[in-house]
Image (spheres, rainbow, N blue to C red):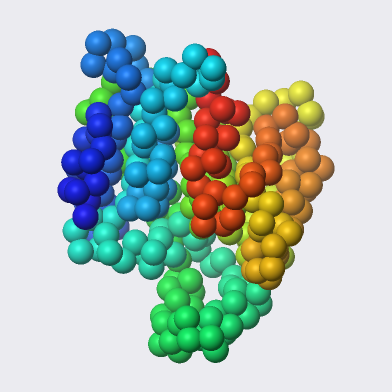
């Protein structure tokens, strides 16, 4: 599957990396128009959930040439899973994108129970999912990105010293929010699309509480948060809860004096269709010329 996606994407190099954790990752690196003719070093924008997102986000690298936009040149790095594990990306992301010790919310349990009762999931599938989200290692994956993958990419490509970004959607958005709150280097911007803050007991709130108060005119890494109208107003209880929690996170960040660092956008999609619009919103808001 990875090789097939690589062959379909222009200006994209695919390779695999063995992490110190023992896990193997597939990496797609997409360079922008004119990269081969230029000598300018460029920032990297990392995109999570590569086995799903690469086909929807990597082609947007061409918007750097759109005369109606002001998106600065960047190289996209899309990270997913390799080999036989590519077919299990939806399960493996629970391990890598969820912060360690993140509680499973009552709304999540209710959604899983309803899926079982409707026949959409078996009890065995529900049990497997709950076991996966009880043993999560977002900290280990973040360390892989920053201390292993980033140096490797700097040795392979023409990479700038600063201006790098991290984007994720759903649990990837939760991961981006977690990385921003951790102050993860070398990232200067973070895009959290519909972040999976599933419960009011999420440790995201603890990390926000731990932030020191700061004067409004002090600048830090930029965080762009998007969520979808259908999540906020639709009929799925879990998505409504997530949207409310994200709004609460934003309110608490503003109270902490982070208004200059945090931007938001309300999109028109659903949770499953909002990825591409969320990514483009992140690019336009945080990566302008």
Residue drawn where x is 54% and y is 41% of the image? 277
Residue 217 position within the rendered picture, expressed as x and y whole percent measured from the top left: 76, 23
Tell me if 37 is positioned left or right of 96 in this view.
left
Residue drawn where x is 63% and y is 29% of the image? 220
Residue drawn where x is 61% and y is 37% of the image? 223
Tell me if 182 is positioned left or right of 22 in this view.
right
Residue 115 position within the rendered picture, expressed as x and y whole percent measured from the top left: 53, 81
User: Viewer-proximal residue, 256 or 132?
Assistant: 132
Q: Quadrant of residue 37?
A: top left
Whether residue 98 can be seen here: yes
Tell me if 95 is positioned left or right of 28 in this view.
right
Q: Residue furthest right?
A: 255
Q: Quadrant of residue 65?
A: top left
User: Viewer-proximal residue, 70 or 184?
Assistant: 70
Up/down of 199 relative to 158, above or below: below
Up/down of 105 relative to 264, above or below: below
Residue 69 position within the rendered picture, expressed as x and y whole percent measured from the top left: 54, 19
Whether residue 245 can be seen here: no
Residue 116 position within the rendered picture, expressed as x and y whole percent measured from the top left: 51, 86
Q: Quadrant of residue 192?
A: top right
**How many marks do you count on the picture?**
0
> Which quadrant of the rendered structure holds the N terminus?
bottom left
User: Viewer-proximal residue, 21 or 31?
Assistant: 31
Tell me if 118 is positioned left or right of 248 in this view.
left
Up/down of 225 relative to 187, above or below: below
Residue drawn where x is 43% and y is 87% of the image? 122
């Amino acid at each position: 599957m990875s090789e097939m996606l690589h062959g379909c994407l222009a200006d994209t190099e695919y390779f695999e990396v063995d992490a110190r954790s023992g896990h193997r990752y597939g990496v797609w690196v997409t360079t922008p128009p004119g990269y081969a003719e230029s000598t300018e070093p460029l920032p990297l924008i990392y995109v999570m959930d590569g086995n799903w997102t690469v086909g929807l986000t990597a082609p947007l690298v061409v918007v750097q040439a759109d005369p109606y936009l002001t998106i600065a040149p960047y190289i996209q790095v899309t990270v997913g899973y390799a080999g036989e594990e590519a077919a299990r990306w939806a399960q493996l992301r629970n391990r890598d994108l969820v912060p360690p010790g993140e509680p499973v919310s009552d709304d999540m349990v209710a959604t899983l129970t309803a899926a079982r009762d409707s026949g959409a999931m078996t009890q065995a599938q529900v049990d497997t999912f709950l076991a996966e989200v009880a043993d999560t290692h977002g900290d280990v994956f973040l360390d892989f990105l920053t201390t292993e993958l980033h140096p490797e990419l700097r040795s392979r490509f023409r990479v700038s010293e600063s201006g790098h970004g991290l984007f994720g959607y759903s649990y990837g958005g939760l991961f981006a929010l977690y990385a921003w709150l951790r102050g993860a280097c070398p990232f200067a911007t973070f895009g959290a699309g519909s972040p999976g803050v599933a419960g009011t007991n999420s440790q995201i709130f603890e990390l926000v509480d731990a932030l020191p108060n700061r004067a409004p005119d002090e600048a830090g890494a930029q965080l762009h948060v998007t969520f979808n109208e259908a999540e906020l107003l639709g009929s799925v209880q879990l998505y409504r809860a997530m949207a409310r929690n994200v709004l609460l996170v934003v309110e608490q960040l503003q109270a902490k004096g982070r208004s200059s660092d945090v931007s938001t956008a309300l999109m028109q999609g659903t949770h499953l269709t909002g990825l591409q619009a969320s990514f483009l919103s992140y690019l336009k808001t945080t990566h302008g010329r």
